Amino acid sequence: MDAWIWIVIVVAVIVIALAAYLMASRRRTGALREQFGPEYDKTVDESGGRRAAESELKERVDRRQELDIRPLAPAAADRYADEWRDVQARFVDSPGAAVGEADRLVIAVLRERGYPMDDFEQRAADISVDHPDVVENYRAAHGISLANDQDRASTEDLRQAMVHYRTLFERLLERETSGPTDTREQVR
């Protein structure tokens, strides 16, 4: 065969390999966007690019698969729901204390469900795999709780924190199977 035929074959193989790589990359991006929703864009912004963000999100998924996250027993879910109602009732008289109790209650539920309690950012990253549509609520509520600890949160801020905590809390009490959930069907 002539050399030019070999060159054409090599170029064709390179073009086909590049096209396959680009298609696989687009599929991975689409799957991560679908799984993580707004958390995908937030991670892209924070990590400085799509490639780094996708690597981080993939690491989150891999880490989550190693964890033993489980639903609450019905009795535990009922007990926590009762505790939540008590915390909400105390908000009227003592909003700052109620937000602190809400934070502790969410942590207790997360712990019982099997989420590691390493640090807040790792906890939020772990939650983002199962509940990407409410993890930002958790971050916002936690930030307000920290501001409250320093007497820098208004009553409206505290009210917002309670709303954010409640959104996550309700999701955590759902009786679900272990493993990442398809939150698109749960959002109403």
Image (cartoon, grey):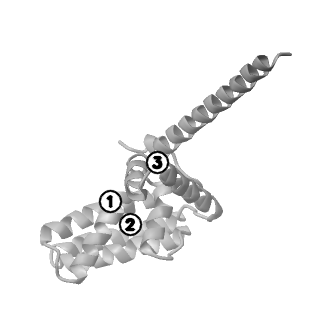
* 123 vs 11: above or below: below
Relative side of 33 to 157, left or right: right
- What label sits on residue 3 in the rendered view? none
User: Which circle, 1 or 2, is nearer the viewer?
Assistant: 1
**Residue ID for mark 3:** 50
Q: Quadrant of residue 116?
A: bottom right
- What label sits on residue 81 in the rendered view? 2
Q: Position of residue 159 (x, y in %)?
A: 19, 66
Q: CA distance from mark 3 to mark 2?
A: 39 Å
- What label sits on residue 137 in the rendered view? 1
Query: Which residue lies at the image location 52% right of the left edge and 49% below the top edge?
Result: 181
Camera-side residue: 66 or 69? 66
Give the class, few, some or many, for how many residues have Cα within 10 Å of label 2's Cα (few <14, many ≥20): some
**Res. 176 visible in picture:** no
Camera-side residue: 32 or 87? 32
Q: Position of residue 123 (x, y in %)?
A: 47, 68
Q: Amino acid at mark 3?
A: Arg
Give the mark nearer the N terminus: 3 vs 2. 3
Q: CA distance from mark 1 to mark 2?
A: 19 Å
Cβ atoms under marks 1 and 2 closer than 8 Å = no
